[in-house]
């Protein structure tokens, strides 16, 4: 039946946030890799925003199995600790090289990772915002979520319209990264919530029972700066991939599974 409505049907059938629930962390990584590879096949010079943390490590392991797909990709990242230069083993710069960039063919000129050792963070923030603009915006931004609801290093209370800037971190966030007796810096530079929201597509990953409460608030709670990740509810093309433990407190978990299983797919009769 032909619709007489002014908007295409997909405007009504598509949830702003698509929730995909997988059995475990390995299946989550498989699904995330499938989504990223799909975007790479569609656009070989994809502008890809990377995220740190334990959660996306399985995704990067899978992406490294396709080392030739990244030759034209433009890379950005979400955040970086203050004072950590690119060669510091604890920097996010090192993290991305260790988990992805050292294993895939890429052009050094296409790697735009934050420099945590920049004296002037305001200048660095402006530079990164300008670079994102010059390449036409982030096509796909990978995201994780902190147990306090942060996205990037946008801690609770961050303006939902914020731009790239320096932030003071919560003690728990710093503790999350403490390893081998070393305490990470209390400050970081991060893409703002508003900057992240301008990505054409966002792919958020969350794994484990310790994320269940915050995932429930992020997906089904009110949108508020107290939980910066709730801004994603307003994103037109956000995909949230969860494993069962992270999804365990969602009130409508079964509904999201049903929607995904019955999703209208291109070419479907
Ligand atoms: C951080 C990072 C975030 C990341 C989050 C979750 O603090 N700045 O970008 O998404 O922690 O980390 P994990 O995946 O280790 O739980």
Image (cartoon, rainbow, N blue to C red):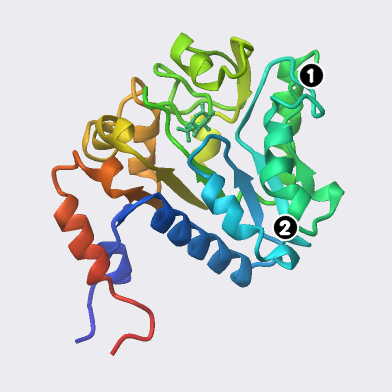
The reply to whether residue 199 is visible in this rendering is no
Q: Position of residue 209 (x, y in %)?
A: 29, 36
Residue at 70 percent across and 47 percent down: it is 75
Tell me the residue that label 2 is attached to.
73
Residue 77 higher or lower than 165, as above or below:
below
Q: Quadrant of residue 155?
A: top left
Q: Quadrant of the N terminus?
A: bottom left
Residue at 82 percent across and 28 percent down: it is 87
Q: Quadrant of the C terminus?
A: bottom left
Contact between marks 2 and 1 (CB within 8 A): the answer is no
Residue 241 higher or lower than 153, as above or below:
below
Label disc, if present, on residue 108 of the rendered structure: none
Disc 2 is placed on an element classified as loop
Q: In this rendered view, identify the residue nearer to me: 14 or 35.
A: 35
Tell me the residue that label 1 is attached to.
117
Whether residue 188 sits left or right of residue 158 in the image: it is right
- For the residues labelled 2 and 1, the Cα–Cα distance comes to 25 Å
Residue at 49 percent across and 41 percent down: it is 143
């Amino acid at each position: 039946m032909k619709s007489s409505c002014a908007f295409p049907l997909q405007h009504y059938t598509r949830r702003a946030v698509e929730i995909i629930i997988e059995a475990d962390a390995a299946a989550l990584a498989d699904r995330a890799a499938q989504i990223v590879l799909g975007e790479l096949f569609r656009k070989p010079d994809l502008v890809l925003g990377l995220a740190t943390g334990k959660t996306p490590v399985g995704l990067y392991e899978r992406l490294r199995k396709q080392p030739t797909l990244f030759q034209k990709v433009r890379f950005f990242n979400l955040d970086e600790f203050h004072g950590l230069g690119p060669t510091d083993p604890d920097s996010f710069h090192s993290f991305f090289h260790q988990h992805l960039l050292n294993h895939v063919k890429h052009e050094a000129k296409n790697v735009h990772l934050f420099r945590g050792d920049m004296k002037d963070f305001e200048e660095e923030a402006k530079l990164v915002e300008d670079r994102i603009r010059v390449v036409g915006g982030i096509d796909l931004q990978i995201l994780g979520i902190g147990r306090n609801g942060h996205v990037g290093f946008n801690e609770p209370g961050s303006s939902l319209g914020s731009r790239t800037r320096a932030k003071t971190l919560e003690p728990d966030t710093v503790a999350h990264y403490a390893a081998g007796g070393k305490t990470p810096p209390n400050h970081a530079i991060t893409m703002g919530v508003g900057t992240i929201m301008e990505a054409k597509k966002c792919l958020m990953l969350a794994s484990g029972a310790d994320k269940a409460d915050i995932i429930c608030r992020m997906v089904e709670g009110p949108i508020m700066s107290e939980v910066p990740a709730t801004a994603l509810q307003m994103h037109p093309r956000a995909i949230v991939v969860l494993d069962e433990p992270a999804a365990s407190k969602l009130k409508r978990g079964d509904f999201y599974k049903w929607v995904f299983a019955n999703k209208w797919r291109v070419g479907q009769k």
